[in-house]
Amino acid sequence: MLPALMVHAEWALAALDGHGLDPTTMLDLHVLLYSYVQGIAVHLEREAQAEAATGLSEDQWMDHQTPALQAITAATQYPVFARVTGSLKNGYDLDLDTLFEFGLKPLLDGIAAIIENPPPRHTTL
């Protein structure tokens, strides 16, 4: 437990408090949301570190990976991956900010659904 993380935990738990959720569900939802945000942040940090180390932007690095990607998609081991990526007319641009927004909405919608219809309370012995 770190003091800065406790500030976030208090904020998140306060938002969930008073909605009829049991303590385990409240903590599970807090950890789920925190882990989602942290996961995307880690990838953003890794991108920045890789660019600093290589001097290549993400797009430049991906351009260098084209032969390896073509070999993977040509292999018969990954037919669904090959079909999906092959159907992209302009390739796939992994934009972490866009991905964050894309994933945050269903995550928050799922949390709202749990708040509206709380699961049965966890019991402890």
Image (spheres, rainbow, N blue to C red):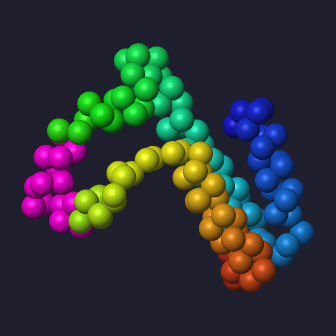
For this orientation, the residue located farthest to the left is: 76
State the image coordinates of residue 15 (x, y, percent, origin top left). 85, 59
Q: Is residue 75 above or below residue 68?
A: below
Which residue occupies the foreground of this view, 43 or 85?
A: 85
- Tell me which segment is drawn in magenta: 68-82
Q: Is residue 11 above or below residue 67?
A: below
Q: Is residue 28 visible?
A: no
Image label count = 0
Left or right of 110: which side holds 17?
right
Residue sitting at x 64%, y 59%: 104
Q: Is residue 111 above or below residue 42?
A: below
Q: Quadrant of the C terminus?
A: bottom right
Residue sitting at x 83%, y 48%: 10
State the image coordinates of residue 113 (x, y, percent, origin top left). 71, 77
Magenta residue check for 12: no
State the image coordinates of residue 118 (x, y, percent, origin top left). 74, 79
Magenta residue check for 81: yes
Residue sitting at x 47%, y 31%: 47
Which residue occupies the foreground of this view, 15 or 6?
A: 15
Q: Is residue 90 visible?
A: yes
Which residue occupies the foreground of this view, 84 or 17?
A: 84
Magenta span: predominant SS is helix
Residue sitting at x 18%, y 54%: 73
For this orientation, the residue located farthest to the front is: 89
